[in-house]
Amino acid sequence: MSGDPLLTARSLALLVYSGVLAPMRPDRMLGTVAALARYGLTPAAGYAAGAARHPDRPAIIDERGTVTYRQIHERSDRLARALADRGVGAGATVALLCRNHRGPIEAMTACAKLGADVVLLNTGLSAEQLAAVLDEQRADLVVADEEFTAALASVPDRPDTVLGWTDGEPGTPYLEGLIGAGGDSTLPARPPAARLIVLTSGTTGTPKGARRPGPKGLGPIGAILSRIPLRAGEPVLVAAPLFHTWGFAGLQLGFLLGAPLVLHRRFDPSQTLRAIGEHGVTTVVAVPVMLQRMLELPEAELDAADTRVLRVVAVSGSAVSTQLAQRFTERFGPVLYNLYGSTEVSWASIATPEDMRTAPGTVGRPPLGTTLRILDDDDRPAPDGQTGRIFIGNDMLFEGYTRSGAGTDVVDGLMGIGDVGMVDENGLLHVTGRSDDMIVSGGENVHPGQVEELTSQWPEVHDAAVLGIDDADFGQRLAAYLVLAPGAELDADTVRDRVRSKLARFAVPRDVHFVDELPRNATGKIDKKRLRRP
């Protein structure tokens, strides 16, 4: 935890209130302490401690059924021995190319027991990108679901591959088969700390690998609990991809809370709604586009869904429009929490339902132990209400990119998130766009995010993206791409008139395109590079 006694006391109070810290039998206490001492705050410690503390509690509920905390601990032990027999150990690198199921969790838990590094591969990577990432990360082994083996087959000098999931006859080697067979190797008494590499959300070229730190104490979960009212032992449905920073955070929160994790390999809004009722899910970890897909379901299906126990829907990964937040709240109640952050800084701020009601469009305020600063172009603090670059400090800043030459801005120990925004009179943060998305049109600085947020609020607009393109007369101009709601009508002149009535003239999009849908990457973020291409 932080060295600040007050922060430590507040974190401990939150952990007690949520039930993470609670009285337990002496033998279970000893088992929990032993797990933390051996593995640190890793998935291995989470499931070993869970096996000591609540061995028969469901740990993962997926399409194969239910496995308990004790079973995950025992299965990952056998898998670790089997992997060690194949040469995986401290310093080795295992890449995971899997959807959401027990396989990647058991694999990363086994790797933690060996001190092997783990690379989380985006399931949306092309074969060319896969080849580049595997080469750059020097992967020794790939655990991949069967559906991705065709893409891997074209990778030259590809590493050994283990199937993580198959719907047909299992090939060899197969993760489940390795777990069943186990191995003869002895596991290290205290494995060295391993690295976790998460890929940035690249949509062209090769995504960069970012070294994510493990929690150095219980402070990070205290930070989340200071803004999101999670409770120990309550079922959590992680819909966000596990390879994404937010999906992996959902996994970490799950085992720290001793929660049953509900996982589906692919997001399906109907399946998600059914699972909430069937498993008594109180918390959903998702990306914003998933909420949109849920709201698109027929009214009768939404009315029939049993979501009475749902208390928290925590989203991250892309912007939540005001309209989406309002529509979701009207349907499901005040359960929406929006975490704003990045792979590099983890979290910057969290908006509660009350925050979004007070200031529509806000991304909230920093959680416990997080420093937020808005800096101008001269790296000086900007006053409230003035737009500047967003810089963050917390205990979970990333450790750097794996690619030589890649870096990020750091000022006075705070890391730049790459966005611009401002803090309002209530202390709430508003993000106006990406630093590199800002355009200069006719000598004026224009942030597309302002126009995107404005157009997203209109009832006729279902989805919106605004970006800068080259202009012979003004240097650059804005182009808006709008997806209309079913049955809605809107024309380009009306769009321009509405924007002109609310924003400066240089923010008026010269180009207005009405499209059937917006291209998105595997994590649901709008892929603006694809919009720029003809």
Image (cartoon, rainbow, N blue to C red):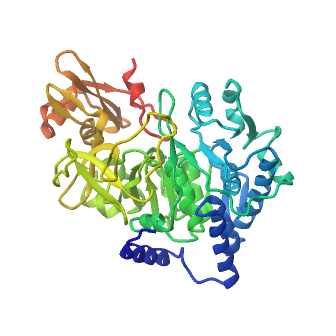
Q: Is residue 254 above or below residue 484?
A: below
Left or right: residue 529 compared with residue 132: left
Q: Quadrant of the C terminus?
A: top left
- Residue 232 shows in the view: yes
Q: Is residue 510 left or right of residue 42?
A: left
Image-based side of 438 in relation to 72, left or right: left
Q: Position of residue 428 (x, y in %)?
A: 26, 58
Q: Is residue 232 above or below residue 169?
A: below
Q: Is residue 459 visible?
A: no
165 or 35, which is in the foreground? 35
Query: Residue 425, located in which quarter of the rendered image?
Result: bottom left
Q: Closest to the observer: 116 or 355? A: 116
Give the number of callouts: 0
On screen, 86 above or below 44?
above
- Residue 308 location in percent, x, y? 49, 66
Residue 509 on image: x %, y %: 22, 28
